[in-house]
Image (cartoon, rainbow, N blue to C red):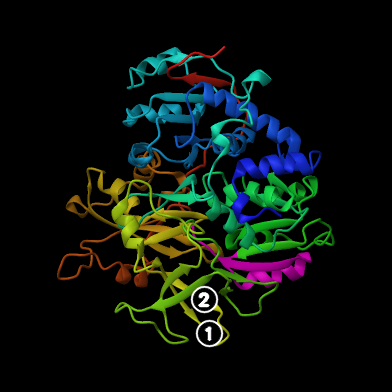
Amino acid sequence: MASEKHCTLRELLERNATQTPELMVLRFDSGEQFSAAQLLEEVQLLAGNLARLGIGKGDYVLSWLPNCPLAVNLYLALNFLGAIYVPFNTAYRGKLLEHVIRISSASVLIADGRLIERLEDVDYSNLDMLIVDGDERLDDDTLQQMPADALRQLSMKIGQVDSDDAVSDSSDNKHIKPEATSTVIFTSGTTGPSKGVLCSYLHLYTSATEFKHVGPTDTNLVALPMFHVGGILGIWFALIHGGCAAYVDRFSTSKFWPAVKELEVSSVGLLGAMVQYLMSQAPSPDDKKHPVTKAVIAPFGDDALAFGERFGIEVHTEFNMTELSVPLWGGPNPTARGTCGKPRQGVSLKLIDEHKQEVNVGETGELLVHVDKPYTISHGYLNDPQASKLAWRDGWFHSGDLFYRDEEDNYFFVDRAKDALRRRGENISSFEVEEELLSHPLIMEAAVVAAPGDGGEDEVMAILVTKNNENIDLEELTDYLSKRLAHFMVPRYFRYIAELPKTPTQKIEKHILRNEGITADTLDRDKLGIIVEKENLYKRKKIKVIGSGELM
């Protein structure tokens, strides 16, 4: 296994290509696959092409792509150059999209062509170049309407360059330090817009090695997208352990078992809701006829151990955040109901109350994390020194999450101290949803809170005060929000009230609204048949480049 001193992606790619050139390290459910030697060659070619566009060490590059070979190889190619990969959610639009582009420090955006029309309504003037994968929606009229006049259309096929254009071993880019920033992953804030989490090579290497359900020769299923840390870590697992990353476009209950059999998957990571969906399928004599031997499940609900028993799989659990590197781990087959595991080596944890005092066993407090080695967790938020200082104060990272622990040092998640929600594996900022609700001309006040959902996760509820206390047509309001928010951020539940509960200082008392829950006057758009569909972006397309420079 690689060491912390040689943990950059470039070193890992070159090591695997030299030691196990024929080993299959990357597979896709689309049928494409790469051996260690093939992957290095593809990455070198793509890196050479990007270098000809002027992209190099220290440059931030935005990636707006669904799971596909280009998304993974782009990540590797940028890091091969020492550039910084900045992926973001393909569902973003409106103010959130504009915010991510603005604070990214990037001058280049590489995007799926079907998303480009969303740029028409936002300011992206800080970009110098737009590389487009797939052009079936990108006609001349669309190009002419784009607000950045400096952007001009060019012709380039990413990755299809002569071998002479590949990045050479003598390149200065080869000397990349473990503590250098590899990736920026955007995560939802709660008192403000989304923040970009700075992830060093050492941080991601540590995270990958602390997920103990993956080992040498494992083929690990990656169902999370490349703009999630789970999607990023998939390729790290393979390169570190000498295994394979098997990427699928998304999680599907009906396609899960056929996919793991076809891709010969031996380890998987599952969200609690995914486990619930799989357990809801009718039992079958073939339930244990599959190659999966290990799974990590979070949160670790009542279905987790039952899942392991039914399907003959060793189960583990953990607690992690994009900013951290798996401070809690449990397994195999932990028996403490609802546990997030115990502290791993190399971290110190404490739980504190609102007075910054440590709480006793069994009492609830905010989780604080300290690591023995610098850069094994995030080193801050991109272009946000105030948020960085607040989160990493007094030598500890303040998670904003509430836990308690038992006498055996098992930790149990209680709630989010912040107002973030988690729906279908996506973190959601209530602040960002409220901002879009308040942009509606008939809404005076808005509060967004969590309502009970499946698999231990949340559904989004919006409590609204409107002009003249009149209800807004729910189909019209859903359509309004769908054009401004990612599909998973659009509330399922809506409730209209005359006045929001507030403190003497006029802060909304969300705990009251959460405790009231789904009341008799709450509208459920799912039951009313008002469904928000997720856009399907999982097809390979052609490539276009819009920007400066010429390519042969």
Q: Is residue 59 above or below residue 445?
A: above
Q: Residue at x 70, y 35 (%)?
A: 39
Residue type, numbered disc 1: Asp
Q: Which mark is residue 412?
A: 2
What element does badge 1 sit on? loop
Disc 2, disc 1: CB below 8 Å?
Answer: yes
Q: Position of residue 302 (x, y in %)?
A: 62, 73
> Which residue is at a point 73% across and 58% down the rendered structure image?
215
State the residue lying farthest toward the left. 504
**309 or 551: nearer the eye?**
551
Direction from residue 228 to residue 481 in the image, left or right: left
Query: Which three-letter amino acid code belongs to the residue tagged 2?
Result: Phe
Q: Looking at the rendering, in which quadrant would you find the C terminus?
A: top right
Asked where in the image residue 329 lies, by quadrant, the reply is bottom right
Binning the other alpha carbons within 10 Å of mark 1 as few (below 14), some (14 to 19) or many (20 upward) gives some
- Residue linked to disc 1: 406
User: Which residues, given as a range, are shown in magenta?
Assistant: 298-321
Task: Please indicate whether residue 27 sits to the left or right of residue 270 in the image.
Answer: right
